[in-house]
Image (cartoon, rainbow, N blue to C red):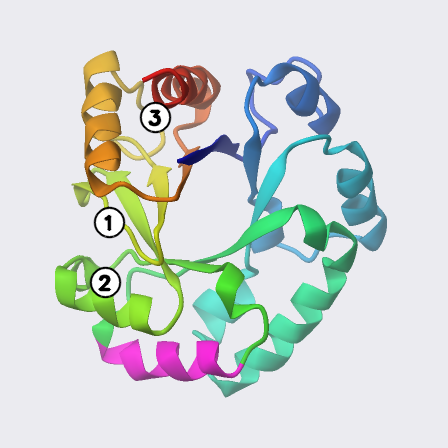
Amino acid sequence: MKVYIGTSGWLYDWNEGGNFEWFVKNSELNSVELNASFYRFPFPNQIKSWAEKSGNIRFSVKVHRKITHILKLNTSAITVWNDFQTLFAPLEDKIDFYLFQMPPSFSPDYLDRVKKFFSNINNRKKAAIEFRHSDWFNEEMVREIEKAGIVFVSIDSPQIQSFIVKTNNIIYLRFHGREVWYNYDYSKKEMKDTCEKIYCLKPDSIYAYFNNDHDMLFNAREFYNMLKYK
């Protein structure tokens, strides 16, 4: 099983250097989610710099909110996606996933739109989709997403608690906080229990990202060591 563990972004109080270089050299992790791309299209020179300085870090790039939250994967979103992906060409060899985080209002009523969107874009094999509407979190919906060739994002959050699934022999897991969003320190037991769930599913690869702000780096390091040395 290949293990990739990271944080959701790197500009937090634990980053003593306040930059990407510090993360690459000191995080002790091997992956990262790029969250800034959700809010704005990065400048080309930024993307080139990340590619040059990334070392062995693998990326998951969060797709811009115009695609997911404004256009909600409609036909017009395909054009925006093409522009977005083209912008990231210098980093493409380092990117394992493009993360499509959907808004809470995006229910399974949009399933046909999801299928249509992903059937009409290139690089679908790198797509991972995270839902926030609770009606997606059942076996039927997971299998529908898998049939569409997309990775269903597992989550650990106050809303869903721990929902972990394997799609396309991959687990992609985001830790948002068990009791409160973003401000939570995962206990050793909680992380060990999650490791057991992962091993029971026997994925080829596990990608896990901590999105719990202050504690994310320390939780990610501990979780990485649990999975690596089990």
Mark 3, residue position: 183
Q: Spatial distance from mark 1 to mark 2, Cα to Cα?
A: 8 Å
Badge number at residue 165? 1
Which kind of residue does numbered mark 1 sit on? Val
Q: Which quadrant holds residue 168?
A: bottom left
Residue 151, horizontal then vertical, whole percent: 38, 58
Residue 50, horizontal then vertical, whole percent: 75, 39
Q: Does 111 lie within the magenta span?
A: yes
Which kind of residue does numbered mark 3 sit on? Asn
Q: Quadrant of the N terminus?
A: top left
Magenta residues, start to end = 109-120
Residue 82, horizontal then vertical, whole percent: 66, 74
Which kind of residue does numbered mark 2 sit on? Val
Badge number at residue 142? 2
Question: Is there a contact, CB below 8 Å, between mark 1 and mark 2?
Answer: yes
**Front residue (pair 56, 27):** 56
